[in-house]
Amino acid sequence: MLRGGMMRDRVETTPRILAVGTATPRERFTQAEILRWTGYTDPLRRGFFLRSGIKHRRLFLDRETFTPDETVDQLNARFERGSLELGCQAILACLEQGRVVPQEIDFLATTTCTGRLCPSLDTRFIRALRMRHDIQRVHVGDTGCASGVVALEQAFNYIKAHPAGRALVVSAEICSATYYLDDTPETAVANAIFADGAAAVLVAGAGDGVALVEKRTLLRPEYLDLMGFIYPGGRPRILLSKEIRHVAAVMLEELSASMLAENGLKRRDIRFWVLHSAGRRVLEKAKDLLGLTDRDLRFSRQVLRNFGNMSSATVLFVLDAVLRSREPRPGDWGILAALGPGFAAEGLLLRW
């Protein structure tokens, strides 16, 4: 049955994730190493680093030559190099796993929130990987950590309309090109958690993969000022209110409850919670409000511990960790969700 009780007059296509590929910079840094660069000496700001739940982060920079005084032009150049390099690596890893070549992709959705390019990332990947010149494409920008899911939703829509097509989603984030140094605690939090990485997801209407049963968006514009970027002197500076961890958990609960109710499911029916690794406190609040266990959050915490928060790519890293675990079995349900400025929660209901 369709919503409202209308009968389907044909069998609808269910988009499926066939493969996921990820890429990170070669250089891996401990929290103590990065803390030294910031120059923070007070217990409050140092504590954001040392109690973050993060062991390592990978950053697209050279530890031997880096100094935290880059110009805006240098930040932009590093973003451009890193997003293209890591994005191409993630794409090739994904397509190799899916046994598809770049020229077989019909639709490309790219996203980033840590830099701006014109022409945008999609055209650069098309040129670098010699994709078809008639490929359909869209670039999703300025939707923050949720934008990987927003881009995945565009692939969902494309496959619904073109069941025989192949769609590719690519998130490439160089968060280290958005660092800012001042005395505010919220800036220190951002510097303590964000990292660099890219992820790619292959979606099609048929094949052996996890089904994308339904997508859902939840917006709360009254919280618009809690998260985002401002650009003092042209340099990106993140806005990250301490209220986020409370609002985020409530919105995750509301988003998941609506998807469950729509599909006649209970919370206990969800075996895999593929949640964006926003930060230690956000995950703890989500655990309490959603009634989750430590086991439910093991993949999100694993990604946070080993990689940090890679903005929009993070939830796709969590999905990759779930798939690589080989724990899901046919019939298992999952919820994939991420949060971003706006304030927004974006989610997908999964079924293996």
Image (cartoon, grey):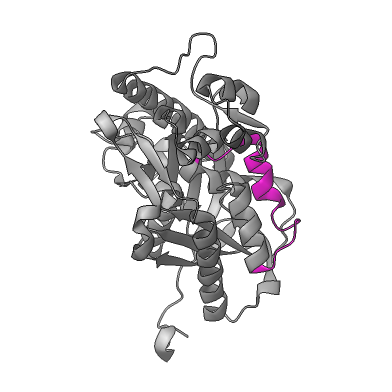
- Residue 109 on image: x %, y %: 37, 47
Q: Quadrant of residue 103?
A: top left
Range of the magenta residues? 290-310
- Nearer to me, 335 or 177: 177
Q: Is residue 201 located in the magenta-colored stretch of the structure?
A: no
Residue at 73%, 61% (x, y): give it: 329
The answer, for residue 67, to whether it is visible in the render is yes
State whether residue 136 is above or below residue 42.
below
Compared to 81, does 139 lie above or below?
below
Residue 291 lies within the magenta run:
yes
For the question of whether residue 6 can be seen, the reply is no
Frontmost residue, 128 versus 223: 223
Total labels drawn: 0
Residue 98, image x, y percentages: 55, 43
Name the residue located 52 percent from the left edge and 21 percent from the top edge.
Answer: 39
Which residue sits furthest bottom?
Answer: 5
Point 70% across, 64% down: residue: 292
6 vs 263, left or right, is left
Given residues 105 and 26, the one toward you in this image is 26
- Residue closest to the far top: 64
Instruction: Name the spot of residue 126 as percent of width and height, x first.
Output: 33, 34
Residue 184, quarter of the rendered image: top left
Residue 79: quadrant of the picture = top left
State the quadrant of the C terminus: bottom right
Indicate the position of residue 273 as horizontal and vertical percent values. 64, 59
Q: Residue at x 58, y 43 (%)?
A: 317
For the residue pair 184 and 229, the one nearer the viewer reads as: 184
